[in-house]
Image (cartoon, rainbow, N blue to C red):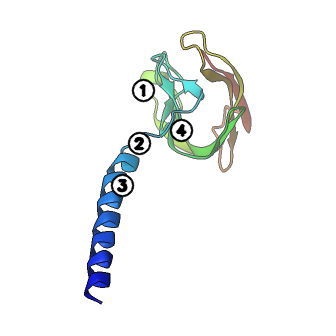
Amino acid sequence: MQRLKLKTAVLICAVVSLATAVVPASASTKPKSPDTVVVDCFSDPQARPDTFLIACGDGNSILTDLRWSAWKPKFATGSGLNVLNDCRPYCAAGKFHSYPVAVRLDRPEPWQKHSGKQHYTEMRLVYTGHKPPQMPREVTYRLWN
């Protein structure tokens, strides 16, 4: 009986030691970055960004509060807000307004700056609630690389 207790104690210690050694190694493993990205205004790759500047030149259109429901090699879908300057009476004096949108990224192509990576080349916005008066319900943008 005494011998069985000793074997059990040794076995428990061995299992605990093994589990302690394995957990930190698996916890420190970084997830692999996606092979398909969207390229931002600064030519940096982004995967599942929270925000995305559409109007790189003047900052008058930005996507915020982005939540991605899918990020796949061929497309990405999500929703968020398009914060857009009304530019009335002109852009410097205009006010920003938020409009809910559905977002779809499409048409991946090889990214010339990073071999092995693809980047989405098209963004489609669908205004799901009220929309800017000067905009159609659906807008498609050609994205840069």
Location of the C terminus (image quadrant): top right
Residue labelled with disc 1: 93
> Alpha-carbon distance for marks 1 and 3?
56 Å
Residue labelled with disc 2: 29
The one of 46 and 117 positioned closer to us in this rendering: 117
Q: Position of residue 76 (x, y in %)?
A: 66, 38
Element under disc 4: loop
Residue plotted at (60% across, 28% down):
35
Disc on the earlier residue, 4 or 2: 2
**Farthest bottom residue in view:** 1
> Alpha-carbon distance for marks 2 and 1?
49 Å
The one of 1 and 31 positioned closer to us in this rendering: 1
Q: For mark 2, does the 10 Å Cα neighbourhood hold few (<14), some (14 to 19), or many (20 or more) residues?
A: few
Number of the front mark, 2 or 3: 3
Element under disc 2: loop
Question: Which of the 4 image quadrants contains residue 99?
Answer: top right
Residue labelled with disc 4: 48
Residue labelled with disc 3: 23
Number of the front mark, 4 or 2: 2
Question: Which of the 4 image quadrants contains residue 2?
Answer: bottom left
Residue plotted at (66% across, 50% down):
129
Number of the front mark, 1 or 3: 3
Q: Are marks 2 and 3 in contact (CB under 8 Å)?
A: no
Number of the front mark, 4 or 1: 4
Disc on the earlier residue, 1 or 3: 3
The one of 61 and 69 positioned closer to us in this rendering: 69
